[in-house]
Amino acid sequence: MNKVRVAVVGAGIYGANHIQAYAWNRDVELVAVCDFKPERLAAVAEKFGVNTYTDVNQMLAQENLDAVSIATPDAYHLEPALAAIMQGKHVLIEKPLATTIEDARKIIAAAEQHNVRVAVDYHKRWDPAAINLRNELRLSTTGRPIRGYMSMDDVIDVPTKWFDWAHHSSPVHFLGTHCYDQIRWYMGCEVEEVYAVGSKTVLKERGIDTYDTVQAFLKFENGCYWTVENSWIFPSGFPKANDGRTQILTEHALLKADSQNRGVEFYNAHKCRTPNSYFIIDNNGRPFGFGIEPINDFIDCLIHDKPFIATAQDGLEAEKIADAVHISLETHQAVKIAKG
Ligand SMILES: NC(=O)c1ccc[n+]([C@@H]2O[C@H](COP(=O)([O-])OP(=O)(O)OC[C@H]3O[C@@H](n4cnc5c(N)ncnc54)[C@H](O)[C@@H]3O)[C@@H](O)[C@H]2O)c1
């Protein structure tokens, strides 16, 4: 079987994981990487021996590709995604699919028109704890879900130091869409109505015009109510860059998951660290974990013509919730979500 010829657009913090995954995938030939930043391209070219480009259209014109991964900043997925789709390439897009419903619909329409497939990297669907919890929810002994709580929070270094585009995104797009997607996947139905509150104080004072924290209340079609909390201002001293908690009360059970409690605690004179042993682990150079599996699954689904686990339609549904959350934050009103 021929290898799948792949390129990655965006060689930043997360694009590096796509590049590593493809470099180790025996079914893939990692052909090219595109980024605006020459220093990032130089490092990638040296390590992986791939062709590099600063212009996605030039890359698509010069390289013979089957598929493209898009790992550009949240608000900038549309342009490279459309460029790749219009050249007939299958696409894996980092979460969120887009930061507007309009962008998400354009990606879906273009994929239909050009007969290509689009997957979204909602990697929490591959987290063993999340899969375990979803399996438990499906047992008749668990009963109907009645109430849910999910939080996902980042330390303040993420929007202030990790990247320079936080003001073009929000904790809702960056973290909330992960939660909305995961909860839709747990519930097996859609959100009907949203109400949200949030504050803009700490980051705004640092010149980053976005929300510090947002609490959203989601009413699902099955009658289950969820509270979702996302913030970008956890203190730097927190033992991990990210924190996530879930608690679901069902007819007959209480289900809990916690991203801190993942098997290891590292202490030194200054700090305790609790890295997530299941996310992305360097195993003698080979990346491994639920952050890598969706990228390998994208290739597997292309080769074997299997449905993607998280599709562009899933990306659109999560973005519809994010959009309703932002409208509710501004209007202080509950917002209904239309079907379709
Ligand atoms: N950082 C994380 O922990 C994390 C985790 C999961 C998912 N993601 C998602 O991955 C995506 C990228 O995030 P990141 O943290 O890697 O950001 P980043 O800023 O580290 O990297 C983005 C890269 O994209 C490049 N770029 C922007 N527009 C481009 C274009 N049109 N063509 C070529 N290159 C372009 C930039 O030069 C930059 O190097 C985001 O959608 C984010 O939500 C990030």
Image (cartoon, grey):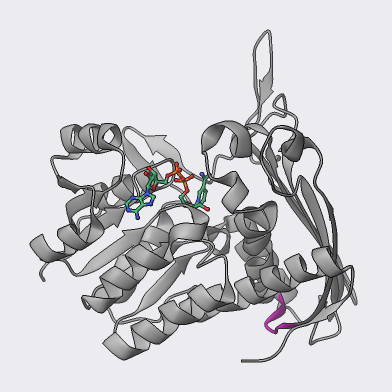
Q: Is residue 21 magenta?
A: no
The extreme top residue here reads: 269
Q: Position of residue 216 (x, y in %)?
A: 82, 64
Camera-side residue of 217 and 146:
217
Residue 63 visible in rendering: no
Report which quarter residue 140 is drawn in: bottom right
Residue 77 visible in rendering: yes
Above or below, 21 against 204 in this view is below
Above or below, 219 against 43 in this view is below
Left or right: where 158 falls relative to 38: right
Left or right: where 140 falls relative to 32: right
The magenta span reads 187-191
Q: Position of residue 258 (x, y in %)?
A: 73, 48
Q: In percent of the image, x 74 and y 84: which residue is there?
A: 337
Above or below, 84 against 44 in this view is below
Q: In percent of the image, x 35 and y 51: which residue is there?
A: 18
Q: In percent of the image, x 35 and y 81: which residue is there?
A: 306
